[in-house]
Image (cartoon, rainbow, N blue to C red):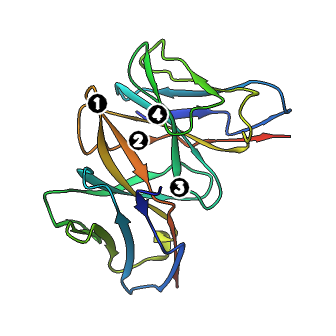
Amino acid sequence: DGGITQSPKYLFRKEGQNVTLSCEQNLNHDAMYWYRQDPGQGLRLIYYSQIVNDFQKGDIAEGYSVSREKKESFPLTVTSAQKNPTAFYLCASSITGTGDNEQYFGPGTRLTVT
Amino acid sequence: DQQVKQNSPSLSVQEGRISILNCDYTNSMFDYFLWYKKYPAEGPTFLISISSIKDKNEDGRFTVFLNKSAKHLSLHIVPSQPGDSAVYFCAASSYSGAGSYQLTFGKGTKLSVIP
């Protein structure tokens, strides 16, 4: 049963702490993405990776970091430098090199920082 | 600068009637357009897409129309069902170099289908 898993579903952290959100896919997709969604807003791209050991900044990368050591995994670290970290975070994956770029999304992680 | 705009934050439709969700874009370089459906606290799921070289794509109750000259697309749902109640995101695909493509999302329209 292929898909994308994100864990945990809900995450709570104190201000000033770094936190890492997990994203795993077994769809054999090369490309993976991280988005952030805020209330009343669309999805905004944080980072994306087209291939293992390579990733690019999206529109709102400041205060975030990623790694892509394995094809299946693309963890996102929300650092203490991120000014407004409380949000719903979505991970996605897709086949590379296709214009229709249908992305498959995980269930999301809601991060609350107090 | 918002490149993909969904100007209606919400829409209410009676069950059985047609739902029409609209989306406008500004970037002529977008080559595919996609619609996603999202329930609260879940990830979006792909619904239907259309290439920029076409003006219509149909899949069951869902039809997407593209008007390139007006930079406008719309999603039609006929007939609307209560299970269609969700937030619908319009997204546009563009080439970002080195064989990669990115999606730019609108802010979404919340559709409520009233039984």
Q: State whether residue B88 is above or below residue A22.
A: below
| Horizontal and vertical percent position of residue A49 | 42, 25
Q: Chain of mark 3?
A: A
Find numbered disc 4 in the image and state the secondary structure of the residue it sits on. strand
Amino acid type at image mark 2? Tyr
Real-space Cα distance between discs 2 and 3?
16 Å
Amino acid carrying mark 4 in the image: Tyr
**Can you identify the residue that label 1 sits on?**
B97
Query: Can marks 2 and 3 be said to lie on one chain?
Result: yes
Q: CA distance from mark 1 to mark 3?
A: 23 Å
Indicate the position of residue B113 as horizontal and vertical percent values. 50, 79
Q: Are marks 1 and 3 in contact (CB under 8 Å)?
A: no
The residue identified by callout 4 is A33
What residue type is disc 3 on? Gly
Query: Mark on residue A104?
Result: 2
Front residue of B4 and A66: B4
**Helix, strand or loop under label 1:** strand
Asked whether B80 or A102 is in front, the reply is A102
Q: Residue at x 43, y 12 (%)?
A: A53
